[in-house]
Image (cartoon, rainbow, N blue to C red):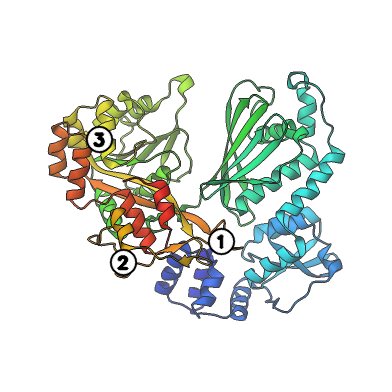
């Protein structure tokens, strides 16, 4: 359920104040629990009280499922896949009408879709959503079971093409790609990936087997694969959805598509194909347009880091750099900054390769190298568009770096990214690109380095004994304003609620403002070690120490911090 909608209902009915609502939304954004469970846990309402409040607001009937046992014949009225997809469980039927309990009773669109799919009237009652979810799992099985069912149907309904790939008729492959079992399988994999909060789906052909993996919380996990013989059909189906050329199997291709979810959210999928020795590998990246996630607290910025970042964003000009390796969350941080700056009176333009999140009110351009539309060319065009804020997806070469520096010196705030290990290394990297030291010293206002570490599961994390000598060897300090008074470290255990003891990820950050002392060192062509020493002298925490702070708060484990940071 949409947390904001639920809170608004409770405020309108006088059950909570607006301040209470704001605190609940903040709690929901930083929690794994749904908003309905948070309301119950905080003693604001009981489960029955929640049902009545929501039911009264939408003109529906509340229904207590706590001791309800669905009739087997009634359950058969809705196919298991549809029930899971729309989050419903049938509770009774009368004539052409099916009464269902919905995991999201505020989502009228889902009911309309179900009505259309079944050709019957659907009436939703309001039950406590966690109870509905539990009944769906109990009576409609797991995703893996559904996949097995579909795989069985594939074997009987899809014709396998014999012979080398080059001899396969493209029209035949296209026809089979649009066959119902293949469509069901691809849709189910997408649904499963979204439900598991996966960031990427990998479809990988090898000589004798086909592998499907999901990247969840930064770690790849294998799921039940389809038969090897259907790799072409699956690849073609995904390429059809992304409007790619199914006949082109020799060259890589990139495409995009959008899908709507039953909760009215929209996800954008980026598809990349790669010709390998044994067929086309496809990677589907799942991109969310949920602007509520673009929150500095939710991303993991501590109070001191937020203060430094906001101070730099308030400056009328200068450059802010976000650094880190691929997959460290740099784009999310930049989008969060743009979200803060996105006001009617500010003209913002961004150039990306490609854009990952569509931000209303911001002029976003994708680079197209084939036609000469690169970062530098687009930046020149931006400067003729009366911009206030410019975002450059990545500084890759001297020309782009030079244009970005000049833009920051001519009254524009510029945000960009670099691939470096830490904040001081960014200065060395730009210098190696040929940027003059006096330009670096005068234009850059803040450099932020970051990593993503996995969050410990709150249901199963266990206290960990950490010796003071180990902490000392790791460089633990107690001088930071963000250091907890009584640190308690935890380790991962694993339970049914998580993935090997972890659930979700959070950022760790090293924010280095360019002070007069650092400016002098930049002008002297100081190396990374000298810059790092000065940063430490000024109280700037390393990534390792920032990670240890999150571990001391019980958010992540020391082993996770050590896996993603160096001294």
Q: Which mark is residue 427?
A: 3
- Rendered image quadrant of residue 145: bottom right
- Percent across and percent down for residue 203 are 65, 37
Identified at 75% across, 23% down, the residue is 170
Disc 1/disc 3 C-alpha distance (Å): 41 Å
At numbered mark 3, what does the secondary structure look like: helix, strand or loop?
helix
| Residue toward you, 183 or 508 | 508
Identify the residue under disc 2. Answer: 484
Above or below, 196 against 257 in this view is below
- Percent across and percent down for residue 15 are 49, 79
**Does 523 sit left or right of 551 as displayed?**
left
Disc 2/disc 1 C-alpha distance (Å): 26 Å
| Residue toward you, 318 or 492 | 492
At numbered mark 1, what does the secondary structure look like: helix, strand or loop?
loop
Tell me if I can see residue 168 in this picture: yes
Identified at 62% across, 49% down, the residue is 193
Q: Are marks 1 and 3 in contact (CB under 8 Å)?
A: no
**Disc with the residue nearer the chain's start (3 vs 2):** 3
Q: Residues within 10 Å of mark 2 (few under 14, many from 20)?
A: few
| Residue toward you, 354 or 62 | 354
At numbered mark 2, what does the secondary structure look like: helix, strand or loop?
loop
- Percent across and percent down for residue 167 are 77, 18
Identify the residue under disc 1. Answer: 494
Above or below, 183 against 231 in this view is below
Choose mark 1 or mark 3, whichever is in front.
Answer: 1
Choose mark 3 or mark 2, whichever is in front.
Answer: 2
**Does 339 sit left or right of 236 as displayed?**
left
| Residue toward you, 32 or 349 | 32
Choose mark 2 or mark 1, whichever is in front.
Answer: 1
Q: Residues within 10 Å of mark 3 (few under 14, many from 20)?
A: many
Identified at 68% across, 61% down, the residue is 87
Disc 3/disc 2 C-alpha distance (Å): 32 Å
């Amino acid at each position: 359920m949409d947390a904001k909608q639920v809170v608004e209902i409770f405020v309108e009915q006088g059950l909570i104040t607006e301040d209470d609502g704001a605190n609940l939304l903040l709690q929901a954004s930083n929690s794994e629990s749904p908003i309905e469970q948070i309301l119950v846990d905080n003693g604001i309402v009981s489960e029955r009280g929640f049902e009545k409040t929501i039911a009264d607001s939408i003109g529906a009937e509340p229904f207590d499922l706590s001791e309800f046992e669905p009739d087997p014949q009634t359950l058969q009225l809705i196919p298991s896949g549809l029930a899971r997809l729309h989050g419903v469980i049938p509770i009774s039927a009368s004539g052409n009408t099916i009464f269902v309990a919905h995991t999201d009773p505020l989502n009228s669109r889902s009911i309309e879709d179900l009505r259309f799919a079944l050709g019957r009237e659907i009436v939703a009652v309001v039950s406590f959503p966690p109870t509905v979810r539990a009944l769906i799992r109990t009576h409609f099985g797991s995703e893996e079971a559904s996949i097995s069912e579909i795989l069985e149907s594939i074997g009987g309904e899809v014709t396998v093409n014999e012979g080398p790939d080059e001899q396969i008729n493209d029209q035949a492959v296209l026809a089979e790609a649009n066959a119902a079992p293949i469509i069901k399988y691809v849709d189910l994999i997408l649904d499963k990936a979204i439900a598991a909060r996966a960031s990427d789906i990998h479809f990988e052909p090898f000589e004798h087997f086909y592998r499907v993996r999901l990247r969840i919380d930064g770690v790849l996990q294998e799921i039940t694969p389809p038969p090897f013989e259907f790799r072409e059909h699956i690849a073609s189906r995904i390429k059809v959805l992304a409007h790619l050329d199914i006949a082109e199997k020799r060259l890589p291709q990139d495409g995009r598509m959008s899908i709507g979810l039953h909760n009215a959210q929209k996800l954008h999928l980026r598809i990349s194909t790669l010709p390998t020795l044994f067929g086309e590998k496809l990677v589907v990246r799942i991109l969310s347009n949920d602007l509520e996630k673009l929150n500095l607290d939710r991303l993991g910025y501590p109070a001191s880091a937020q203060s430094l970042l906001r101070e730099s964003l308030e400056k009328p000009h200068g450059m802010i750099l976000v650094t880190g390796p691929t997959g460290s969350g740099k784009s999310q941080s930049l989008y969060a900054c743009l979200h803060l700056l996105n006001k009617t009176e500010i003209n913002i333009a961004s150039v990306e390769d490609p854009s990952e999140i569509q931000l209303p009110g911001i002029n976003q351009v994708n680079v197209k190298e084939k036609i000469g539309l690169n970062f530098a060319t687009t930046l020149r065009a931006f400067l003729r568009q009366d911009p206030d804020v410019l975002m450059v997806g990545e500084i890759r070469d001297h020309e782009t770096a030079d244009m970005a520096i000049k833009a920051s010196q001519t009254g524009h705030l510029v945000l960009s990214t670099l691939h470096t290990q830490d904040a001081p290394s960014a200065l060395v990297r730009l210098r190696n690109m040929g940027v003059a030291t006096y330009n670096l010293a005068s234009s850059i206002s803040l450099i932020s380095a970051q990593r993503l570490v996995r969050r410990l599961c709150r249901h199963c994390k266990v206290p960990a004994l950490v010796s003071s000598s180990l902490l000392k060897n790791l460089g633990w300090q107690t001088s930071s304003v963000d250091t907890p008074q009584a640190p308690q470290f935890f380790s991962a255990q694993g339970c049914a609620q998580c993935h090997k003891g972890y659930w979700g990820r959070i950022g760790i950050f090293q924010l280095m403002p360019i002070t007069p002392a650092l400016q002098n060192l930049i002008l002297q062509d100081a190396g990374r070690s000298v810059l790092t020493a000065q940063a430490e002298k000024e109280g700037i925490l390393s990534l390792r120490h920032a990670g240890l702070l999150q571990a001391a708060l019980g958010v992540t484990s020391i082993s996770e911090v050590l896996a993603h940071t160096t001294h």
